[in-house]
Image (spheres, helix red, strand yellow):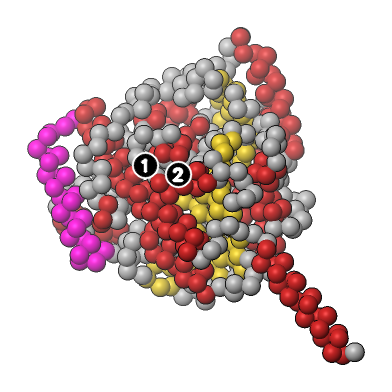
Amino acid sequence: MVKQLFAALSVLITVTAAAQQKRPNILIIISDDHAFQTISAYGSKLTSTPGIDRIAREGIRFNKAYVTNSICGPSRAVLLTGRYSHKNGFRDNVSGRFDSSQHTFIKDLTGSGYQTAWIGKWHLESAPEGFSFWKVLPGQGAYFNPDFIKMDNSRERIEGYATTIIEDMAESWLDQRDTSRPFCLVIGHKATHRTWMPDIADLHRFDTVNFPLPANFYDRYEGRKAAALQDMTIDKTMLMDYDLKIFASAEEAGKQASIQRMTPAQKQAYGTYYGALQQDLEKRRLSGNALVEWKYQRYMRDYLSTAASLDRNIERALAYLDKHQLAENTLVVYLSDQGFYMGEHGWFDKRFMYEESFRTPLLMRWPGKIQAGRVDSSLVMNLDLAPTFLELSGLPVSSQIQGRSMLPLLTKAGSKGRKNLYYHYYESGEHAVSPHFGISDGRYKLIRFYKRVEAWELFDLHADPSEMKNLYAQKKYAKITRKLKAQLLKLAEKYEDAEAIALLKKG
Ligand code: SGN
Ligand code: CA
């Protein structure tokens, strides 16, 4: 009898283990400030991104994926919780500190038997909770010889280049995991964040390329008060030394923290490369537009070089899955924490609800489940990822979660995305972007700025995709404005955004 019971029990245990293994693994690669305008899968001609393009070719590319609050910490908090910033408490990078005791999809996965890990950029100030393993960069982290915070809170400095080191660490974690259980691994890259420091091997990569200026590079911000007030132009905000690494002397270079931490060999490679650029620039005696355009070219070259390493390490992650026969049963997700300006409106940085920063790249691969080569133009948000992961791993979606699962979009033909997108940006600090919230239905976008600037903006994205013409208060658009305002209030109420509701009720 006892023997039979044991036999039955062992069958049960084997079945459970087999079922466990069958649940899909989830690999999320989240970069920082990676603009869809620079990804060849999104049609970019600026560079090629074979790693990301492979995900697009073998999976699905979301053409209209958006964030709820276009900035780093808040975006990661939304990814983890599936809740808007006013609900998860991480509104901005200045005062934000993630309350790690709150509910996250990771906690549910860990609780149900998944092995979970976050490796790389985290930027949520508090220590991660609910993961089987984590090893994260402090704050923004460094490109060269980065420090990592370990689970016992001690720090470790690792020599080399951050993007490659983070992928190395992710692979080591996968190597030692328990293969009888599914995993959910988040690889958080620092690239392509400011200040753009290429890996030594990539320094000359774009030397001979001249990048075209975006058509609205010399935007004068007519009719858009908040856009006029910002402090994020390549012309005025981007610094020759700090950002572009053009220093008057080696001594000056040595004062920068990002250079100080380099090894002598790294310093020498940087000194040789950027020193030659500095000398060349001095000879040219550029000023006015010629100087701004020179800065733009340098920005593009440095940024795209950090992106080249990012893409290479994405290719490595995919190759790891191939090599270990994990590709079939793993959902791979690539996204950035938000979009970024590559000179549009004369800018770098993000924050605004305008398309370049509101939108994010988002691609997924899940062989056999997601048809290869799909392009989906439904409206989706980073808010929708947490419920998607829960649903596809067979777990209930807590009623606190405000996003809607994208699983039907991934697996069922004819499924629909969102009708409207609701956005709220809070930070009022660096780069001087006024707080604002708004709604977009994919064609019309209505934005309400407050605090620094009191203003409304309305755009017709079909007629004006670059958002140069504020149509607010034009008679012809009174009807659509009224409709959008009513929908905006409804959404603010639905998501219980008290601050926005109060402002809307004031008018
Ligand atoms: C830093 C950058 C800003 C950037 C924020 C937020 N300045 O403060 O340019 O907007 O991060 O970026 S820097 O001088 O420190 O590079 S985010 O990716 O964390 O949201
Ligand atoms: Ca970011």
**Measured Cα–Cα span from mark 1 to mark 2:** 8 Å
**Number of other residues with Cα within 10 Å of mark 2, as a class: few under 14, some 14 to 19, many 20 or more:** many
Q: As rendered, which of 114 and 74 lies closer to the eye?
A: 114
**Circle 2 is placed at which residue position?**
53
- Can residue 35 be seen from the camera position used here? no
Inspect the image, locate mark 2, and give the three-letter code of the amino acid beneath it: Asp
Q: Residue at x 86, y 85 (%)?
A: 5
Looking at the rendered structure, the secondary structure element under dot 1 is loop
Residue reaching furthest bottom? 2
Q: Quadrant of residue 107?
A: bottom right
- 320 in the magenta segment: no
Q: Is residue 185 left or right of residue 46?
A: right
Identify the disc placed on residue 48.
Answer: 1
Q: Residue at x 35, y 49 (%)?
A: 308
Point out residue 303 in the picture as x, y percentages from the top left corner.
Answer: 34, 45
Residue reaching furthest right? 1
Point out residue 443 in the picture as x, y percentages from the top left corner.
Answer: 59, 23
Q: Considering only order in the chain, which callout, 2 or 1, is on the residue closer to the N terminus?
A: 1
Secondary structure, magenta segment, majority class? helix
The image quadrant where one finds the N terminus is bottom right
Q: Residue at x 54, y 63 (%)?
A: 325
Please say if the residues under marks 1 and 2 sit with CB atoms less than 8 Å apart.
yes
Q: Residue at x 62, y 50 (%)?
A: 368
Point out residue 338 in the picture as x, y percentages from the top left corner.
Answer: 50, 43
**Number of other residues with Cα within 10 Å of mark 1, as a class: few under 14, some 14 to 19, many 20 or more:** some
Inspect the image, locate mark 1, and give the three-letter code of the amino acid beneath it: Ser
Q: As rendered, which of 496 and 33 lies closer to the eye?
A: 33
The image quadrant where one finds the C terminus is top right
* Part of the protein shown in magenta: 262-287
Identify the disc placed on residue 182.
Answer: none
- 276 in the magenta segment: yes
Point out residue 270 in the picture as x, y percentages from the top left corner.
Answer: 21, 55
